[in-house]
Every structure is written in structure tokens, then in C-alpha cells.
Image (cartoon, helix red, strand yellow):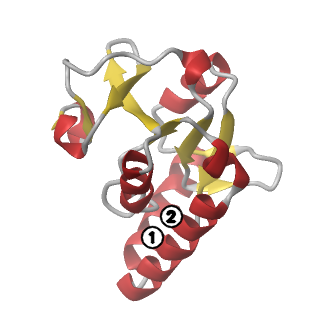
Amino acid sequence: MRDKSALRRALLRQRRETDPAERRAIDRAITERVLQSEPYRHSRTLFVYYSVAEEIDTHAILSDALNSGKRVCLPKCLPGGVMQPRYITSEEDLTEESYGIPEPGAHCPAAELTDIDLCLIPALACTAQGFRLGYGGGFYDRFLPRTPAYRMVLCA
């Protein structure tokens, strides 16, 4: 486990040290790839994280999904390490709660896991086989087996 922690620290340091212009270019390229992808174009209900700090920026994807009439849900962290998808209709539905990350407010309805077509998942690193290294909380590791949705891991 110590090796994963050291790898996480090194990857986070590398992200922080990446030139901001290069990071913006990477974010734009990933955003375009997602927006042009068949899974995104055909999805009706999108589960997406709200990016913070050096994470791959999802704000343009979130905006596109809301403006194009997709149903959008974001994670709400509940006690016991459970992540619950909740619908939002605009970014105004978000409040800063768990871990200082904006998430759906208490008024936002829960989404049925089977209604989600596409999950956009953050990662520090991933393999071509789809194995991901997250931030260490295990939230997505517990969440993903519960939904049959197509998954796209956003990583650079």
C-alpha cells in the first residue's frame, strides 16, 4: 500500500508542476475527445465528476451536457464511503461539502444507477486494460461495480 501512496504523491506533484498552458491544452484535447465520442453523443444520462485543482477539467463537458438536454448527475459523498449519483439541472445546484469538492445539494434527487449511460471517472493514472489509480478514497472502486454504465477514465 505504501507504494501506491508514494506513486500518488509523485503523480500529484508532477501534475502540479506541469506548465499551466500545457495542462489547458491537455484538458481541451480530452474534452474534445469525450464530446466527439460515440458513447457521449448517444448518452442520455451522464455521471460526471466536478473537477477541482489539477484534475482533468470537466467543466466544458458538464456545460455541454446540460445545454444539450442530457440528464446530468454528479457524485454526492455519503457516510460510510458511499457515493450516490444525484441529478443537477445547473451548476447552481452544487454546494461545497465533502472534501471541499462541489457536489449536488440535498434538494437534488438521486439517480437510478441503471439509468446512467456513461460515467466519466477521474484517475491519477491508468493502464490500457482499464485499471485505474485514483486518489485513494476508494469511492469509485465501490461505486463502479454497482452501475452497468459505459465508463471513460479521464487521465493524463
Label 1: which secondary element: helix
Quarter of the image for residue 118 reads: top right
Of 18 and 63, nearer the camera is 63
Q: Residues within 10 Å of mark 2 (few under 14, many from 20)?
A: few
* Image mark count: 2
Q: Nearer the viewer, mark 2 or mark 1?
A: 1
The three-letter code of the residue at mark 2 reads: Ala
Of 60 and 14, nearer the camera is 60
Which is nearer the N-term, disc 2 or disc 1? 2
Of 14 and 6, nearer the camera is 14
Residue furthest to the right in view is: 129
User: Residue at point 38% right, 72% down?
Assistant: 16
Q: Residues within 10 Å of mark 1 (few under 14, many from 20)?
A: some
Labels 2 and 1 touching (C-beta < 8 A): no
Q: Is residue 123 left or right of residue 83?
A: right
Residue 105 in the image: state x and y as whole percent.
20, 26
Is 56 drawn above or below residue 108 in the view shown?
below
Quadrant where the image shows the N terminus? top right
Residue 46 in the image: state x and y as whole percent.
51, 38
Of 91 and 154, nearer the camera is 91
Quarter of the image for residue 125 reads: bottom right
Label 2 – label 1 distance at C-alpha = 9 Å
Is 56 drawn above or below residue 66 in the view shown?
below
Could one spot residue 1 in this view of the protein? no
Residue 29 in the image: state x and y as whole percent.
56, 75
Residue 145 in the image: state x and y as whole percent.
66, 21
User: Residue at point 31% right, 32% down?
Assistant: 88
Q: Which residue is labeled 1 in the image?
A: 15
The three-letter code of the residue at mark 1 reads: Arg
Quadrant where the image shows the C terminus? bottom right
Q: Which residue is labeled 2 in the image?
A: 10
